[in-house]
Amino acid sequence: MKNESLRINTAEGALRGAIDEGIFVFKGIPYAAPPVGALRWRAPRPAAPWSEVRDATQWGNASWQLREHCVLAGGGDPGNISEDCLYLNVWSPDIEPSSPLPVMVWIHGGGFVLGAGSLPPYNGKALAARGVVVVTLNYRLGHLGFFAHPALDAEFPPGEAVNNFALLDQIAALQWVQRNIASFGGDRRNVTLFGESSGGRSVLSLFASPLAAGLFHKGIVQSAYSLPDKKRDEALSNGVAVAHHLGLKKASADDLRALPAEHFCSLPSQLGNGPVAIAGDRVLPKPVVEVFAAARQHRYPLMIGYNSDEGSVLDYFGIDPATTITRLRQRRPLLLKLIKSLYDEHDDRRLGRKVARDIAFGTITWLAVQAQHRRGVPGWRYYFDYVSENTRDLCPDGSWHGNEIPYVMETMTAENPQIAEREYSAGDRAFARRISEYWLRFAQDATEFSHQLNGETTWPAWHPGADVTLRFGVKGEAAVVLQHRFMRMRLRLLRLLMRAMVKLH
């Protein structure tokens, strides 16, 4: 494949990118200053301008993480790992279009501890070839991205503390898009955020953050989870415990910033900060679930859904879903009887997997579309239940967590270590084309006044009366069909029971 070079000007300086099969590609663009040294655990600062043409043909560094975990579960090898990680990538089909193109900004998942915008499943070339500008980004992960400690809080005026540095990175990347995306042919007035897992949770967090207002215009949330955000007092206690574990009994801010970044990747699990943000700082004043429950999110269109076997994540964490059912049987037999009445399932493993899926991933979709309706802006709910033709024996319970990504982004050639040597078929690729069309239509057409998304099946926005869900796949087979009141009673009940169930689990 022959790559031709290309020069483009941004607010910070000129870039030299490449042309890959007709798509303009720019990699490793700094969107903020390196958050290193004195800038660790501070809001991202502007990137220093440059005078010479900067090479933008190599990926930027990924945030500190455990490489082997990312290879196994995060989508591939993240490449160079460094605390200097605030870089983004752009794919554009036309840098001088007759009218500006829709922009789609991808926020990668990985539990806020793994991942990078450069991973093969997130390559933006295929979507860009269909008429959008795609941006992927890296942001601070783990304790570098989410951290609270009294010594750091003391640097802020009262009530102004920042703990969600990763969310501020994402906001800084959106500010870069507003400054520069026109140079790549993009429309800064039509920016869609989309992401999966913790990336989807990030989209919901930005819907809830006052600091993100006006920087994007709509969001797509894939397989976000319903877990509560960490409370700030808990995060502060965790930060003190982390410092003690690393030998700092009375840590100053300078002491904390002098710790090697890699030390934060090898902490015991009880000192982890979980796959959620910290509620109560200036970036996220209220928990995401609370904001949506009160319908106080930004008034932007939202598309949200989850997969038929989200319970697959339990395998990664070594959790036996049958154990949860056993505990319910022992401690809450009447509750178990009520839950079983909603599921035509008598095997404890399968029942536990489905309950985990619906309570951890389904309830947030139900809450979000209700909140959109109450806010007076459209929301669309989907359910992904397609399994690639050559992996149906591996996936008897449905589509795994994250399995929709290569269909959405049409990255069917990307390697997935979990299904090595199970190539995607022509049928899989054809179905991917049908699915990604809805993501593109949303990015191109959805506004706060939309009542439907057009496509092979017209998809009405959700409202309580019709309660329509669009199914991508049915029992693993290719289909795009509307379903009314899909899992309605089940999700209503589980939403009410969510706190008790999460505590029990």
Image: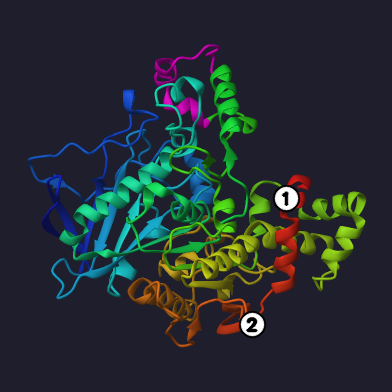
Q: Identify the residue shown where x is 48% and y is 51%.
A: 205
Q: Which residues are drawn in magenta?
A: 246-265
**Residue 433 position (above or below residue 272):** below
Q: How is the image coloured?
A: rainbow
Residue 386, picture quadrant: bottom right
**Residue 406 position (above or below residue 163):** below
Front residue of this view, candidates 367 and 404: 367
**Residue 57 spot, x, y in % from top left:** 21, 51
How many labels sit on residues?
2
Disc number placed over residue 484 in the picture, else none: 2
**Residue 472 position (above or below residue 135):** below
Disc 2 residue type? His
Residue 249 magenta-drawn? yes
> Where is the N terminus found, in terms of image quarters?
bottom left
Residue 353 magenta-drawn? no
Disc number placed over residue 499 in the picture, else none: 1
Residue 3 appears anywhere in the view:
no
- 336 left or right of 242 in image: right
Residue 346 appears anywhere in the view:
yes
Q: Identify the residue shown where x is 57% and y is 17%.
A: 244
Q: Identify the residue shown where x is 62% and y is 47%.
A: 228
Disc number placed over residue 456 in the picture, else none: none
Badge 2: residue crowd in 10 Å (few <14, some 14–19, many ≥20): few
Disc 1 residue type? Arg
**Residue 30 position (above or below residue 178):** above
Q: Identify the residue shown where x is 41% and y is 66%.
A: 413
- Element marked by disc 1: helix
Badge 1: residue crowd in 10 Å (few <14, some 14–19, many ≥20): some
Residue 411, picture quadrant: bottom left
